[in-house]
Image: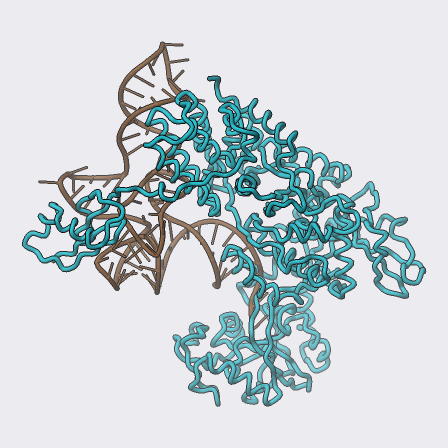
Amino acid sequence: MENYNFKVIEKKWQDKWEEAGAFHAETNSKKPKYFTMIEFPYPSGAGLHVGHPRSYTALDIIARKRRMEGYNVLYPIGWDAFGLPTENFAIKNKVHPKIITEKNIANFTRQLKMLGFSFDWSREVNTTDPAYYKWTQWIFMQLFKHGLAYKQEMPINWCTSCKVGLSNEEVVNGVCERCGGEVVQRRKSQWMLKITEYAQRLIDDLDDVDYLEKIKIQQKNWIGRSEGAEVKFKLSTGDEMVVYTTRADTLFGATYTVMSPEHPLIEKMKDAITNYDEVEAYKAEAAKKSEFERTELAKEKTGVKLEGIYAVNPANGEKLPVFISDYVLVTYGTGAIMAVPAHDSRDWDFAKKFNLPIIEVVAGGEDVQKEAYTDVYKGKMVNSGFLTGMTVKEAIPAMIDWLEKEGLGKRKVNYKLRDWVFSRQRYWGEPIPLVHCDKCGWVAIPESELPLELPELDVFEPGENGESPLAKAYDWINTTCPCCGGPAQRETDTMPQWAGSSWYFLRYTDPHNNDVLASKEALEYWTPVDWYNGGMEHTTLHLLYSRFWHKFLYDIGVVPTKEPYMKRTSHGMILGENNEKMSKSRGNVVNPDEVVDEFGADAFRTYEMFIGAFDQSTPWSQQGLKGCYKFLERVWNLQSIVTDEEGYSKDLEKAVHKTIKKVGEDFERMKFNTAIAAMMSLVNEFTKKGSVTKGEYMTLITLLNPVAPHITEELWEKYGGEGLLSLHPWLTYDEAKTVDDEIEIVVQINGKIRDKILVPADIDKAGLEELALKNDKIKDAADGKTVVKVIAIPGRLVNVVIK
RNA sequence: GCACCUGUGGCGGAAUUGGCAGACGCGCCGGACUUAGGAUCCGGUGUCUUUGACGUGAAGGUUCAAGUCCUUUCAGGUGCACCA
């Protein structure tokens, strides 16, 4: 028997799989379909991170098992290749991002192929390919035509020294990541997508999908539905200020009101405000602050009182001061609040700082002068007119009813979710397929002109005034209006990286179609995705955006299902050996190339699955990796004790059936670590016995195949297995042979273990009790005491309670 | 601050409905083989004051029985940032 030579074996089987087209998915095959998918990677210059294969191996195991179970499996791969790092590299090195992207993709492809994933490479997609982004643009165009895309002034991060707009990611500690210059907020007209119109459906339809509970919770928290009321406050100027509140019950406790600095009423009331200079200064200060500073300074509340103005509490007619403060956000609710310091901790902080009265209207807490009492479950209303004596739960609807009756307010549902800022002033993204005509406004280009390709440029830097690099492509910009034929200019902003990843799963079903984004037939057959795995960091934005686009496509009849993904799971991070996040600066990065070179792909895959609980983050261990390599070597070396017998031997039969059951079930539950542990145990049993039948060995190899596909194909071939093991049927087990005839039962006295007895597996409660009471140790212990109770749990234990 | 997650040997981690805590692997200790061992094989390995007792971050509670359920609390991680 030659030594385990993974280098030869792995190359050999990767070639064979490719030759045989073993992992090609066939649209409309007679077999049942199974569509499983991992988040397609961003092909960074750093190459594959050891975190990528954790997710890819896990679903590769599922894909391979499904194939063996007779499914027609689609397990695709592609590239989410637009994005900032590539563009910044391009700017710095004066190379076209396309060239960098090609190079990075080639490297990623090599690395993924070396790991033996069963991807259908014939369906590879690339978001930067015009044949792909033609359809990203097409979807945007439909959104535009259905009124879901609009332009609005939005603040952007502006580096005062580079004179460019920055993404949040590029703003580090309030300064520009590249030059360290000051970052301020600047307003710019941006394309927005109305995701808020889908807020309720994005919550409701979570009931129909199988996501990890924590992912559903995160989606719901992000959308942030709240039920409350809008209440009208009359101002001394005669104007009306509408506030939003979820605690209408506390209206009698309002002691002041606050508007956000950007609130439009402020300018309207300019003449009535006696300290307008001070107000202007505060507004300017707030506008100058970057988002970072505004939130960082949150500890200390700031604000300015609008002198010469007051608001009237609609509940009791009291005159309340009006403030502006940046703790009130113009983007949420109505941009104005009523402040109830006794029962809201932010209002409380503000009231203390500005010496405002704190009036208790919900009793049940400690002294409200010392701390706000925010509990809504226990308290009773006090000092609140007709609400006094009610619970908070009763008082909220009672107050809203009263407000509605009096015409002073109304019920209102609010969402934290904001519309999606869809413009980027960048080169490396999909061009937005619209033109602006002085006569016709914003007009979509004809569909026949798609894809609208990126113009060739030599310089990829954003412009001095924050405009997109595309603004420099004069020939490209100037065009004619598709509507009136007059002169028009193209939109120079590009789409965000999220765009291409919001619908890529659809393209996998029919990646080469040039007439539609995917044929009806392919979509009907393949969608929805049956199982989607990815990182926890994408469970809000990416997942929400793609669900939104999918629902829109469903509404316009392009896709047949309401939801894109039936099942969504997430994997934990792999940390460095020092238990910290892997990063170049920490010097704890593990390079997959080196691991595979030294131990092979199979050992790498096995270790990544054995490393710990799949959904938990866990540190890398070179020793642990070695242990998995040794396990594969032991499997290989078992060859020296394999006999010619086909079936299972008497003494190992049970162990084999149990292992088949456990491994299959554990794979489905993503308990890969315990599945591998079970296979290790089986190998230990083989070794202990000193011989193993060919039947037993082939079973082990089949179970191990989804995890370590190369070594197992090789052994399968050596022992005369038919065809490719990867396409061989998965194993069945005999339930009867997974249970023992005789089991060990624990005998306890007062909950402490005193003995263990061997009993027939099917013994009943009475039989167990009898056996336990006959037990010598129990008799000794019970001597002179009374047996109070005997608890017998068949299959588990007997507990004798004595006194 | 809010939300979610996690605390179990020297380490990574096991442990259906509450029912033998520590599976499996690493490391360590001992032995065999060996010119050699960072190879391989065999045995051992939670702690202690070892006829037994104690042990799952801490403190209470429920129960015949708690890693698992309840209450309080401490520590770490992740996400979001004043959401009225």
Tell whether A1 sits left or right of A528: left
Q: Quadrant of the C terminus of chain A?
A: bottom left
Tell whether A107 sits left or right of A536: right
Residue at point 54%, 89% (across, down): A316
Q: From what the image shows, is residue A228 above or below residue A48?
A: below
Q: Residue furthest left?
A: A784
Chain letter, colour brown in render: B
Chain letter, colour cyan in render: A
Q: Looking at the image, which is closer to me, A144 or A373?
A: A144
Q: From what the image shows, is residue A411 above or below residue A46?
A: below
Residue A747, horizontal then vertical, whole percent: 19, 48
Residue at point 84%, 61% (across, down): A443
Residue at point 61%, 86% (across, down): A408
Q: Looking at the image, which is closer to me, B75 or A141?
A: A141
Residue B12, horizontal then vertical, whole percent: 42, 40
Residue A444, horizontal then vertical, whole percent: 83, 59
Residue A561, horizontal then vertical, whole percent: 64, 58
Q: Looking at the image, which is closer to me, A708 or A329?
A: A708
Q: From what the image shows, is residue A251 above or below residue A419?
A: below
Q: From what the image shows, is residue A389 above or below residue A637?
A: below
Image quadrant where residue A493 sits? bottom right
Residue A706 visible? The answer is: yes
Residue A182 visible? The answer is: no
Q: How many marks?
A: 0
